[in-house]
């Protein structure tokens, strides 16, 4: 019989699960980095690729993966994220049909799930764009500033106070790098396990300004080994942020549920999806 003419390859959930599994495997293999995992920096890549969104102009967001290009790749806030982009290059080579825009956001969802966080339902449909879609510098937050700045940046994306606090709870993961942001990271914290610890520390520890010649940051009185950024501290200085910090510090389930919903929203800002169907990927320890 006439060989069936092959139509275009339309990836299905099973194909995206294969990409998820390849990222999870690479996370398990590549442990000689920071505190033992590339997970935190993958989360930061997905967040910085998406957090450029401006709801008034509909510009920025994860659709386009424009951080591949200078000047966006060279914006100060994106220092160090080449490590995350390079980590995902072999995955792109293995699955060339996936866009960078979909790959980077899938990498963020995979990292949260593989670091014991909540499931992050995910939709494909982002398309890579060229350098003309690069966003101007200044779209991402400046850690040296205060609660007014946090509200300006996140309300521009379309988030309310509760959503801003939930999102910043990702600071349970990873660390700061003096050769990237200039801030100095925590180390005896469990930076490769997703928990509500960030909120518990904010409300339970006493925080003093760190005595050093680097940028203003805070250290915990009891061990002197943890850190908070000025914008982290803003979450307990501002009473409407603080009530959410206290709620998440007491209720890890509420934090997990609300973080999942708002991280999904972040990764989808401004994307003209063709489908409403989201995939929930199986985490590697569930197989
Ligand atoms: C007020 C908002 C925020 C500010 C000012 C901020 C600032 C920073 C800074 C300065 C670092 C250290 C970067 C380095 O030196 O490597 C950092 C790390 C990180 N941020 Fe944020 N961030 C904010 C919100 C968020 C959000 C919304 C997410 C994700 C949902 C996030 C996820 C992370 C992660 C996972 C790391 C650790 C990265 C690593 O270990 O390499 N941050 N952030
Ligand atoms: C405990 C803590 C506080 N703030 C952070 C900011 C950025 C990255 C990691 C952080 C972190 N582990």
Image (cartoon, grey):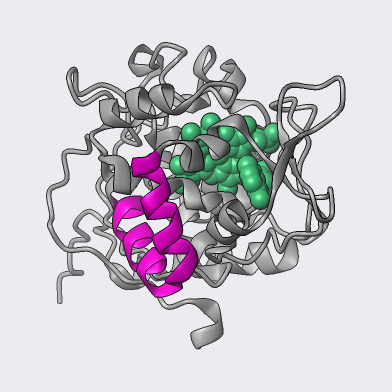
Q: Which residue is situated farthest in the right direction here?
A: 212
> Is residue 265 depicted above or below 148 in this figure?
below
Which region shows up in magenta?
239-264
Residue at image point 87% right, 26% down: 212
Give 109 or 11, whichever is nearer the viewer: 109
Q: Does residue 132 appear left or right of residue 5 in this picture? A: right
In this rendering, does residue 97 appear at all?
no
* Image x and y of residue 187, in percent: 80, 53
* Magenta: main secondary structure: helix
Q: Does residue 207 appear left or right of residue 241 in this picture? A: right
* Image x and y of residue 5, in percent: 18, 61
Q: Check the picture and name the quadrant holding the N terminus.
A: bottom left
Residue at image point 32% right, 61% down: 258
Which quarter of the picture shows residue 231?
top right
In this rendering, does residue 43 appear at all?
yes
Any magenta on residue 196?
Answer: no
Which quarter of the picture shows residue 127?
top left
Give 45 or 89, whichever is nearer the viewer: 45
Q: Does residue 45 appear left or right of residue 39 in this picture? A: left
Which quarter of the picture shows residue 80?
top right
Q: Which residue is situated farthest in the bottom direction here?
A: 287
> Is residue 152 depicted above or below 65 in this figure?
above
Residue at image point 33% right, 17% down: 133
Task: For ligand 1, give the image quadrant.
Answer: top right
Residue at image point 41% right, 11% down: 136
* Image x and y of residue 114, in percent: 55, 69
């Amino acid at each position: 019989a006439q060989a069936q003419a092959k139509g275009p390859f339309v990836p299905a959930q099973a194909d995206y699960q294969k990409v998820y599994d390849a990222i999870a495997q690479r996370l398990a293999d590549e442990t000689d980095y920071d505190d033992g995992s590339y997970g935190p920096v993958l989360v930061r890549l997905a967040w910085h690729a998406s957090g450029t969104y401006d709801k008034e102009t509909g510009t920025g967001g994860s659709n386009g993966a424009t951080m591949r290009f200078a000047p966006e790749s060279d914006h100060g806030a994106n220092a160090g994220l080449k490590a995350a982009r390079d980590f995902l290059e072999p995955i792109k080579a293995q699955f060339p049909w996936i866009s960078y825009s979909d790959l980077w956001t899938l990498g963020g969802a995979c990292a949260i799930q593989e670091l014991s966080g909540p499931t992050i339902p995910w939709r494909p449909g982002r398309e890579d764009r060229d350098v003309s879609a690069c966003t101007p510098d200044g779209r991402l937050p400046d850690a040296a500033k205060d609660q007014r700045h946090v509200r300006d940046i996140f309300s521009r994306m379309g988030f309310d106070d509760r959503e801003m606090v939930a999102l910043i709870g990702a600071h349970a993961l990873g660390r700061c790098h003096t050769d990237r942001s200039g801030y100095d990271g925590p180390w005896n914290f469990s930076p490769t396990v997703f928990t509500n610890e960030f909120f518990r520390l904010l409300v339970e520890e006493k925080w003093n300004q760190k005595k050093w010649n680097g940028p203003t940051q805070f250290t915990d009185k009891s061990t002197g080994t943890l850190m908070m950024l000025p914008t982290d501290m803003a979450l307990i200085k501002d009473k409407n942020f603080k009530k959410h910090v206290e709620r998440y510090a007491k209720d890890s389930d509420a934090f997990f549920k609300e973080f999942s919903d708002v991280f999904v929203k972040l990764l989808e800002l401004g994307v003209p999806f063709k489908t409403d169907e989201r995939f929930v990927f199986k985490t590697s320890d569930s197989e």
